[in-house]
Amino acid sequence: MLLNGSHGSEQRVVELFNYIDTHQDEFVQDLKDWVAVSSDSSDPLLREDLSNMVEIAAKSIRALGATVKLVNMGEEKLNDGRNIPFPKAILAELGNNSSKATVCIYGHVDVQPAKKEDGWNTDPYNMTEINGDLYGRGAADNKGPVLAWINAVKTYKSLNQEIPVNLKFIIEGVEETGSPGLEDLIKAHASFFSDVDYIVISDNLWLSRKPALTYGTRGSAYFFIEVEGGTKDLHSGTFGGIIHEAMRDLIYLLANLIDSSGHILIPGIYDDVAPLTEEERKLYEHIDFDLEEHQNNSGVNTFLYSTKEEILQHLWRYPSLTIHGIEGAFSGPGSKTVIPSKVIGKFSIRQVPNMKSSVVQKQVTKHLEDVFAKLKSPNKLTVSMIIGASPWVADVNDPQYAAARNAITKVFGVTPNMIRDGSTIPLARIFQDLTKKSVMMLPIGDADAGEHSQNEKISRSNYIQGTKLFATFFLELSKVHEELMAKNHPSVGN
Ligand SMILES: C[C@H](N)C(=O)N[C@@H](Cc1c[nH]cn1)C(=O)O
Ligand SMILES: [Zn+2]
Ligand SMILES: [Zn+2]
């Protein structure tokens, strides 16, 4: 029997944990090396470091003894008509024992933009440890968790312990731009995924200091509103006062998307939102969440809502709309006096069950065209949805969740906080829809990780304890899988 070999399972766990504890500085140095690569995926013309980062990750996974392939993710069409390839993705596999469960680990090695002058206390690409926190862009989102999975496997290999499950990896480099091309990649490599029993993702945060299991995320519909007023920028003295300025039109359109209470003004946008049932309402009572701590972590003085239930519901199960920025407008230092000829407003809607991107796209486009018509402006309006990622919700009775619960209890001594997440991981719903296989999110990011913010970090504790969690999860999942195989459970197998 796998777990009753020369080492009892308890003895194996002790050895695993001791190794992880005594090698934690190496693991931290590895993360520092990864954070040092500015793998920002936001600008398609500045992705050389990102491609390097994918190669570095591939090399680390290959060093585990895995078979690694770098596969194409398609091409991106630029505004000037050029097509450039997306960074390649990693597909890797380690082990193919038919009596074992096959777990596919998903992660991403691209990051959001970061500059010291944005207000970081340290260099975002020189990971700095302060009071047990590891500060750097990507430390939590998602390089730390990806490395924690690699550390867990490396620990088994270093101890010559048999890895209790077959492993596969899918690691991408464009998750932060909405995982374009990922659905086509999964379809093109259907055979790679055909023997996967479980997908596990660790690209989220805890909600409090209590370890968590995530069973839902919101989707993301990302829109560009382009208003074009002429063929070139103009002097605002020479032309200001006699033309319909594109920026004025755009600001008016943006102001008609959402009101000051957070209510989205797009007609019909709430029509498909799943009604709140009494059963769901009861779930919020048991969630570990410190409203004041969350507010302190956010750096804002007040929230739109004052109770735990309202805040969590509006983070998880109601849509939100955020205006992100304006491309083409002047935003540098100084006082440039120009009328921009073309500006692009950017906003996104976090979708929830049962909203559909195609319906949202129609509602948004019609609303903006109706508002624009009232302006009687000669300028040209173009509305485009550049990302349409769907929300995801899992069945918490899925056997993979039982294994994760057991692992969390073994490592942290508590039962997990069962939570959803307001952010988006496009792969989750794509994989769930395409393969009907089990998808689970097992986060190790701290609640105050500051994903996408200045001073993003992962605590050394969550990084190292998270490595132990992943190592234990392999053991617990192999137990659950063996029991299922014994019962010939319909959820297992291809
Ligand atoms: C949750 C994950 N760490 C993340 O940050 N995902 C992004 C994905 C996305 C959506 N639109 C563009 N990128 C997010 O939720 O913002
Ligand atoms: Zn992110
Ligand atoms: Zn992420």
Image: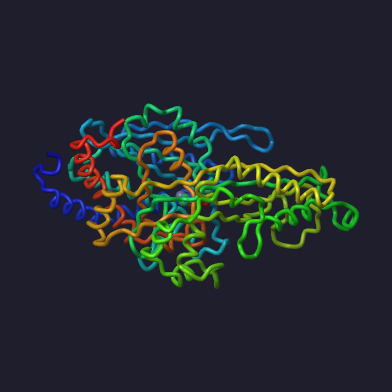
Q: Name the colour scheme.
A: rainbow
The answer to whether 135 appears left or right of 228 in the picture is left
The answer to whether 394 appears left or right of 120 in the picture is left
Q: Quadrant of residue 386?
A: top right
Whether residue 25 is visible here, answered yes or no, is: yes
- Say above or below: 67 vs 342: above
Rendering coords of residue 271 (x, y %): 59, 50
Residue positioned 91% across, 54% down in the render: 242
Rendering coords of residue 383 (x, y %): 69, 43
Residue positioned 36% across, 55% down in the render: 444
Rendering coords of residue 11 (x, y %): 13, 52
Looking at the rendered image, the quarter that the C terminus falls into is: top left
Count of numbered circles on the image: 0
Q: Residue furthest left?
A: 6
Q: Residue furthest front?
A: 278
Residue positioned 53% across, 43% down in the render: 389
- Taking depth in this image into account, of 336 and 391 the one nearest to the observer is 391
Looking at the rendered image, the quarter that the N terminus falls into is: top left
Rendering coords of residue 292 (x, y %): 45, 72
- Taking depth in this image into account, of 269 and 199 the one nearest to the observer is 269
Whether residue 139 is visible here, answered yes or no, is: no
The answer to whether 216 appears left or right of 381 in the picture is left
The answer to whether 286 appears left or right of 488 in the picture is right
Residue positioned 39% across, 54% down in the render: 32
- Say above or below: 354 vs 420: above
- Taking depth in this image into account, of 13 and 402 the one nearest to the observer is 402
- Taking depth in this image into account, of 263 and 194 the one nearest to the observer is 263
